[in-house]
Structures are given as C-alpha cells and as structure tokens.
Amino acid sequence: MKKTILTGLRPTGNLHLGHYFGAGKTWCNIQDDYDFYLEIADVQALTDNFNNPEKVRQNVYEITKDLLAIGLDPNKVNFFIQSQISEIAELTVFYSNLVTVSRLQRNPTVKTEIAQKKELFGNNGESITYGFLGYPVSQAADITCFSGEVVPVGEDQLPLLEQCREIVRKFNSIYGETLIEPEQLLSTTPRIKGLDGNDKMGKSLGNAIYFVDDEKTINNKIMGAITDPSKLKKDDPANPDICMVYYYHKLVNNEENISKVCSECKKGERGCVQCKKELIDAMNEFLKPIKEKRKYYDEHPEVVDKILEEGTNKAKEKAKETINNVKKAMKINY
C-alpha cells in the first residue's frame, strides 16, 4: 500500500517560480507514489490575515488553479480546504494541552517569525496572537488528522515537523499507540533567489515571477534583473555566477543555451540586454503550457469547485476515522 503524504500551502497570494522549483516540481514528480493529500491552509492563513478574510478566500481558488496548472493531477492528489475539516480544529484543541507556551516560543521557526513581526510592528511583540503562537500545534493536527506518514519539508520547516513528532509521542505515551509519527521528505532544492539577488523571492519584494504575470510584466521584471556590476560595457567579460539573469537561464533554458550563455558571458561576447531578451523568450516558452492550463481553469471555475469539493469530502472521511480513534483513546467517545 502507498504511504500517505500530507503537504499544503497557505492561500496568501499567487504562486511564483520559487514555489514551483522549491516544492511544486517535487510534488508533481511524486504524486504517483503516495496517497497524496494537499491542504489549502486557509485557517493558518488567517493567523496573520484575520482582518482580510476576502483576500484569503480568493486565494484559495487562485493557488488551486496555480497548482493544477503546474501539473498536479486531481485524480492523484486530494485537494482540500482546511477550514472545512472541523476535525483539525478538534485535534488542535486536544494537542494544545500537550505543549507548553515556552516550548512554542523556543521553536526556531516561530522565534524567527516572531522576531520579524517585532521588527515590522514594534510594540515588543504585543501584536503576536494566540493563534500565531500555536501555529505548530495546528500544523501537527493537519498532519496527524490524515495519518500523514511522510511530510515534504525544507530545512526551515524541520523544527515544525519535530514539534509534531513530539506531540505524537506525548499523546501516544499518555493515551496509547494511536497516532503515526511522521517522517520527513527533505527538499534537496535550495531556496530560489529573487531577480534582485535577494535570497527570498516574494510579492512584498517585487522580485518574483508569477504564473499569472503577463508577457509585459515578465519583460519588465527581467529587464530590471541584477547582473554582474563589474560589467560596464557590452564587450566586458563578466562572472555569470553572480548574475541573476544567468541564474534564471539555468532554471528555464536548455543545457545547450545555458552553456552558450555562460561561455559568451565570460569571454565578453554578449551584452546584458541581449542576454535578458533571450531569457525573456526562454521564460515565456517555459511558462506557456502552465499559462494555457491555468487559462482553462480560469474559464471553468466550476471544475475547480468540483475538484475542491471532492478532495475535501475524501479528506473529511479520513479525518473522521482519525478523530474517532483519538476520542476513543482519550475516553471521550460518549
């Protein structure tokens, strides 16, 4: 039997190339190998978007269309909406008794995000909500609700998965062997850099290429990409390894062209404008099939609705099995 895999995304905005190369491509490659549950984590998106629910609701559909467009097959992947699975909320309440506040505050991922919020909002962290601090508990409920045996993670998410394992061990030690302790499927892909050379790609930085970007937008973004600052004239040799244009050529171009770009750049045989225009062509060619699939789903919202409904119904069945076992173990199956 196939192992169950659980992963998901918070619907806070459209997907970009960083999402694809960092996780989406891997999901597409392994969707035949697992009983695959993909959560659209709208409840978790509300932890820091609670005052903008319409944004979260709209992005549930936006990222679902993006995920379908990159090649995830709804016949192989169960897309479901987190808020529609009430069993996750029940498990979150039960697990909250097994984790101390100090342990949550020590979680490296949470500590980093709290520090970012303090820097952004000031007020010594007084804007941190109970729901935000309890994010790892909610995530543990997500994973165990569907008996997730495997969870794809990046290095930065390992502390969250370890906290889930701690909760599972604590629950099982008190109530008996009930929950499955999940394994990690560690991503081997480093975080994709932005067009500006920033290690993080994101909407707030304006350095990402999204699947919904039109050709004019892509053209403008690539023409503004960072190149080797030491290259002052067209015929100056340059170092492609510090050029974001070459970096993106390596992501979306073919091996022959990549080799040509690298060689000519080092010899001073190509200008940056030429290189950027070639990248624009390669990028549009790479994105063409994704955009075509996405256009189909844009024009057929009823198909997206059906995919989410069917996936959520299947997830609900799985969640009911889990909650029944948990309540039996906790002696609250009245």
Image (cartoon, helix red, strand yellow):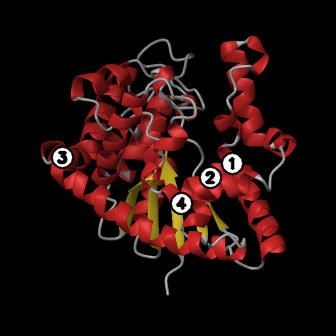
Q: Quadrant of residue 230?
A: top right
Q: Are marks 1 and 2 in contact (CB under 8 Å)?
A: yes
Earlier in the chain: of badge 2 and badge 4, it is: 4
Mark 4 and mark 3: Cα distance apart in space: 27 Å
How crowded is the residue under tag 3: few (<14 C-alpha within 10 Å), some, or many (20+)? Answer: few
Please report the residue visible at 62 percent of the width from the left and 52 percent of the height from the top.
139
Give me the residue at 71% from left, 59% from top: 164
Name the residue type under label 3: Pro
The CA span between labels 4 and 1 is 16 Å
3D distance between C-alphas at marks 1 and 2: 5 Å
Q: To which quarter of the image does residue 105 belong?
A: top right
Q: Can you say whether 239 is above or below 98 in the image?
A: above
Q: Secondary structure at mark 1?
A: helix
**Place of residue 154 in the rendered image (x, y in percent of width and height, measured from the top left):** 63, 51
Reading the image, the residue beneath label 2 is: 139
Report if the CB atoms under discs 3 and 1 are less than 8 Å apart. no
The answer to whether 157 is drawn above or below residue 312 in the figure is above
- The residue indicated by pointer 3 is 301
Among the two numbered marks 4 and 3 on one chain, the one whose residue lies closer to the N terminus: 4
Q: Is residue 297 above or below residue 230?
A: below
Dot 3 or dot 1: first in sequence order is 1
From the top left corner, tell me how far across and down residue 209 is, in percent.
38, 32
Q: At numbered mark 2, what does the secondary structure look like: helix, strand or loop?
A: helix
- Whether residue 30 is visible, yes or no, is no
Residue 87 bears which disc, if any? 4
Give how far apart the Cα atoms at labels 2 and 3 are: 29 Å
Judging by the rendered image, the residue that carries numbered circle 1 is: 136
